[in-house]
């Protein structure tokens, strides 16, 4: 996490812009003028044999419930991260001792959160 807040925000901004541009150019759910639709892609994959009903690409209810629980856990983790960031943003001028800085880095290390380790 050795990146300045400004550099992080810029990377995040670029990533969002890139995703937005892609979706606007390709996804028919975002822009009705685009022809790409999920159901069309799935139908083509079924027809070409890239997938089949026996290769469950689509979610069963039990899997959806498990996914919902995982999503809620991820949201809880993100909420915790957001709370920590908000606390540290309130005191931008504070110069912490190295030992404390290392503790904070360990606390916010992405490897400590399932959301980031997929």
Image (cartoon, rainbow, N blue to C red):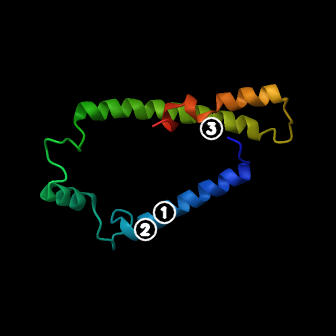
Q: Is residue 33 above or below residue 72?
A: below
- Residue at point 64% right, 33% down? 108
Q: Give the image location of residue 72, x and y in percent.
A: 44, 32
- Residue at point 77% right, 31% down? 101
Residue 88, located in which quarter of the rendered image? Answer: top right
Marks 2/3 in contact by CB < 8 Å: the verdict is no
Secondary-structure class at tag 3: helix
82 left or right of 72?
Answer: right
Q: Residue furthest bottom?
A: 33
Q: From the viewer's side, name the closer residue of 48 and 11.
A: 48
Q: Give the image location of residue 66, x and y in percent.
A: 33, 30
Label 2 crowd (10 A; few <14 / some 14-19 / many >=20): some
Secondary-structure class at tag 2: helix
Q: From the viewer's side, name the closer residue of 78 and 110.
A: 110
Q: From the viewer's side, name the closer residue of 112 and 9.
A: 112
- Residue at point 54% right, 58% down? 16
- Residue at point 74% right, 29% down? 102
Marks 2/1 in contact by CB < 8 Å: the verdict is yes
Q: Which residue is mark 3?
A: 82
Residue 43, located in which quarter of the rendered image? Answer: bottom left
Label 1 crowd (10 A; few <14 / some 14-19 / many >=20): few
Q: Give the image location of residue 97, x and y in percent.
A: 85, 29
Secondary-structure class at tag 1: helix
Distance of mark 3 from mark 1, alpha carbons? 23 Å
Marks 3/1 in contact by CB < 8 Å: the verdict is no
Q: Which residue is mark 1?
A: 20
Marked residue nearer the N-terminal end (3 or 1): 1
Q: Which residue is mark 2?
A: 24
């Amino acid at each position: 996490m050795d990146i300045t807040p400004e550099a992080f925000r810029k990377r995040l901004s670029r990533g969002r812009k890139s995703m937005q541009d892609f979706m606007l150019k390709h996804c028919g759910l975002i822009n009705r003028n685009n022809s790409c639709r999920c159901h069309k892609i799935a139908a083509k994959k079924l027809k070409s044999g890239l997938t089949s009903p026996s290769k469950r690409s689509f979610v069963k209810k039990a899997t959806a419930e498990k996914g919902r629980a995982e999503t809620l856990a991820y949201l809880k983790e993100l909420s915790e991260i957001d709370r920590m960031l908000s606390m540290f943003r309130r005191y931008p001028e504070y110069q912490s001792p190295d030992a404390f800085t290392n503790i904070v880095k360990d606390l916010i290390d992405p490897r400590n959160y399932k959301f980031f380790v997929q």
